[in-house]
Amino acid sequence: MFRIFGPAVERRAGVIAISAISALLISGTAHAQAPTPYVFPGGSGLVLNFVKADKTAEWEAMIEKIVEAMKASDNPQRKAQAAAWKIFKSTEQPVKEAVLYFWRLEGAPTDAEYSMVKILQELFPKEAAAMYKEYSDAYVPPAQQIFHLALVKDFSK
């Protein structure tokens, strides 16, 4: 029998070696940490929050508590995050069962993470799990939409 690429045993060993190397490379990249969408390296962002209409008061009170804790924090980065964070409520209701809130982040620390999980764990370590459950239960799909912004032109100047 004529073989172009050598004996079948050598080919199988080569295929196994290539498969093993590929698996290692793929698993290595799978464990690499993906960047979080809650960091705004350009210093500006917009986060749309779709909150259940019957949960708005609880959601607003929780956000108020969190921002007040950020302002009172010993961590200067948390204080800077709070100073950059403005929250708007839409007068329109684009989703029937939801009220739309906008987080406008302007002048945000470029390496600070606005992940609610991390903020709650840092500021409210004993209450974090219960608070996060209440926070996340207030949302309807799509829950949040996150936009990283780059300034094109400032017409105020």
Image (cartoon, grey):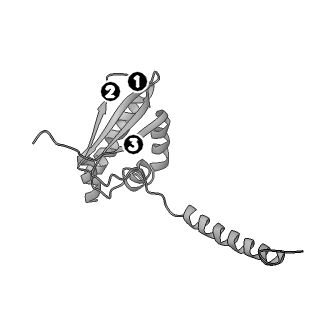
- Give the label on residue 146, or none: 3
Residue at image point 41% right, 50% down:
37
Above or below residue 50? Residue 21 is below
Query: Circle 1 sits on which residue?
Result: 94
**Mark 3 surroundings: few (<14), some (14-19) or many (≥20) residues within 10 A:** some
Closer to us: mark 2 or mark 3?
3
Residue at image point 35% right, 32% down:
101
Q: Is residue 105 visible?
A: yes
> Disc 2 versus disc 3: distance between alpha carbons?
16 Å
- Residue 45 appears in which quarter of the rendering? top left
- Give the label on residue 73, or none: none
- Residue 122 appears in which quarter of the rendering? bottom left
**Mark 2 surroundings: few (<14), some (14-19) or many (≥20) residues within 10 A:** few
Disc nearer the start of the sequence (2/3)? 2
> Disc 1 versus disc 2: distance between alpha carbons?
9 Å
How far across and down, in percent of the image, does residue 109 sit? 27, 55
Q: Nearer the viewer, residue 91 or 134?
A: 91
The amino acid type of the residue labelled 3 equals: Ile
Query: Circle 2 sits on which residue?
Result: 90
How far across and down, in percent of the image, does residue 80 sit? 24, 53
Residue at image point 45% right, 39% down:
135
**Element assignment for label 2:** loop
Q: Nearer the viewer, residue 106 or 2?
A: 2
How far across and down, in percent of the image, does residue 61 sit? 35, 35
**Element assignment for label 1:** loop
* Name of the residue lying farthest toward the left: 157
- Residue 110 appears in which quarter of the rendering? bottom left
Above or below residue 55? Residue 63 is below
The amino acid type of the residue labelled 2 equals: Ser
User: Which quarter shows the N terminus?
Assistant: bottom right
Marks 1 and 2 close (CB-CB < 8 Å): yes
